[in-house]
Image: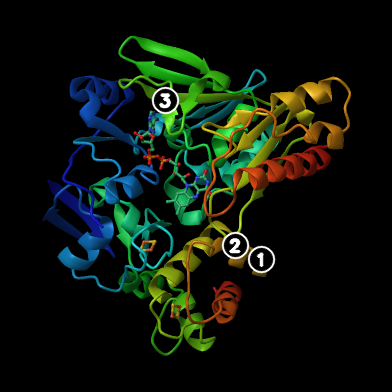
Amino acid sequence: MKLTLTVNGTTHTSEVEPRTLLVHHLRDNLGLTGTNIGCDTSSCGACTVHFEGQSVKSCTMLAVQADGGEITTIEGLADQAQQAGISTGDQDWHPMQEAFHQCHGLQCGYCTPGMVMAATSLLEENPDADEGGVREGLEGNLCRCTGYHNIVKAVLQAKGGA
Amino acid sequence: MIPAPVEYTRAGSAEEAISLLTEHGDEAKLLAGGHSLLPMMKLRLATPAQLIDVGRLDELRYINADNGEVAIGALTRHTELEHSDVLADACPLLKHVASLVGDPSVRHRGTLGGTLAHADPASDLPAAVLALGGTLVAQGPNGRREIAATDFFASYFESVLAADELLVEVRVPSGGGGWNYQKFNRRAQDWAIVGVAVADGGKGIALVNMGATPLRATAVEAALAGGASAAEAAAVAAEGTSPVEDGNADATYRKHLARVLTERALNAAG
Ligand SMILES: Cc1cc2nc3c(=O)[nH]c(=O)nc-3n(C[C@H](O)[C@H](O)[C@H](O)COP(=O)(O)OP(=O)(O)OC[C@H]3O[C@@H](n4cnc5c(N)ncnc54)[C@H](O)[C@@H]3O)c2cc1C
Ligand code: FES
Ligand code: FES
């Protein structure tokens, strides 16, 4: 069926099978491979994107459920920050990306796109989150490398700087 | 993992959803937040031929407190319950329990009607609605009917909803006495191994994952009404239960948890 999605500010019209998962549509049809697939069972958060401004697991949504809506993926986050006038650092990134970079909030980087998207949504929803709030707010995102400490540090730094 | 081929229609109104259900019969499934149905479809545990998406029915997304009662639209998302100022005053138990479901991304999608209709005895919000003595409103081709939460759950993943009925509203009493929710699990973001919801100072108590449906702890309620202490009443919390055995816990351990968590919940509810 016909699907119209605005992804990172660009409107795409595509023909998809209704059973197509949002994550497959983003990666395979639109070529936006920044969003990863980890568990494929709604548990790890590697596939986290924003739908209508809120974090969602794109492996647990049909692309057609988002029809007519707005999606932001990791590829669009810096642009969004630049438009909002909050981008920062040498690369003109979103403050969350800059904070992950500065705090060494990643090792292999596999969880990072999902982690960054979940973290930005978390601060949007709970701008005053303290360390406990950040840890709980990221409970749906698994990282096998960092032990989370530097991720939490990064989110708290981004909160302070944003 | 990809679901089996399926047709998809987005319903524009409750009436349209019901007429689509009538038209497609057993082949059709309503899709709300999709956070129970899609994982099952990906595992091919569910293979509906037709999905009827009600997830965007904003007319069924509201939280209103009026006349000693809170009315909540069935398509209200967990995140909206969690952040509701109306519930903070009128029904803090529901607000708190919603904040413990899954993780934030799950709560951005999952709906109150979906978790009730899915009727998983391990789910949190159904037990809260049961403890509160809530009422569910179903709409079918012949109009609306009210179902007491105590009559709603039939068995594992089974409610008394007919195949052509849509859950449209959930009503719970507002105010009431002390409340508490104990959710025991070993991993963040997970379902309860056992949970206990206490509403209205112990007048309503419901158990999570202690049988085929969420259960009212009637023996505990009766003991409290008869003047028993929290410890005495909690001692009978496992009476009449037949919990599942799984990798997390056997039945004996679940019964132990039910007693311990009930005592904690009663003490915290005051
Ligand atoms: C990773 C993860 C963790 C989770 N953790 C928890 C947890 O800790 N505790 C917990 O309680 N739940 C948990 N859940 C489940 C979550 O709460 C689901 O959102 C909820 O169970 C189903 O709601 P839904 O709106 O997504 O329903 P859907 O998946 O869309 O639908 C579920 C079923 O209900 C039917 N249905 C939906 N809406 C209606 C309606 N209005 N009328 C009639 N039938 C309807 C559908 O046809 C389907 O059969 C978790 C889910 C995931 C993916
Ligand atoms: S791939 Fe979606 S949650 Fe793991
Ligand atoms: S950095 Fe490797 S999984 Fe998180």
Separation of residues labelled 1 and 3 (CA atoms) = 36 Å
Is the residue under label 3 in contact with that under label 1 (CB below 8 Å)?
no
Q: Counting other residues with Cα less than 10 Å from the Cα at mark 1, is it few (<14), some (14-19), or many (20 or more)?
A: few
Say which mark, if any, is on residue A136: 2
Label 1 CB sits under 8 Å from any ligand 1 atom: no
Give the x, y percent position of residue B208: 60, 38
Tell me the CA gap for discs 2 and 3: 31 Å
- Residue B74 vs A60, above or below: the answer is above
Instruction: Return the mark for residue A132.
Output: 1
- Residue A159: % across, % down: 58, 72
Q: CA distance from mark 2 to mark 1?
A: 6 Å
Mark 2 vs 1: CB contact within 8 A: yes
Say which quarter of the image contains residue A70: bottom left
Residue drawn at 49 percent across, 32 percent down: B62
Q: In screen coordinates, is B158 left or right of B270?
A: left
Q: Chain of mark 1?
A: A
Is residue A121 visible to us here?
yes
Give the secondary structure at mark 1: helix
Mark 3, ligand 1, within 8 Å: the answer is: yes
Q: SS at mark 2?
A: helix
Q: Considering the image in quadrants, where does the C terminus of chain A appear?
A: bottom right
Three-letter amino acid code of the residue under disc 1? Gly
Disc assigned to residue B167 = 3
Q: Amino acid at mark 3?
A: Leu
Q: Residues within 10 Å of mark 3 (few under 14, many from 20)?
A: many
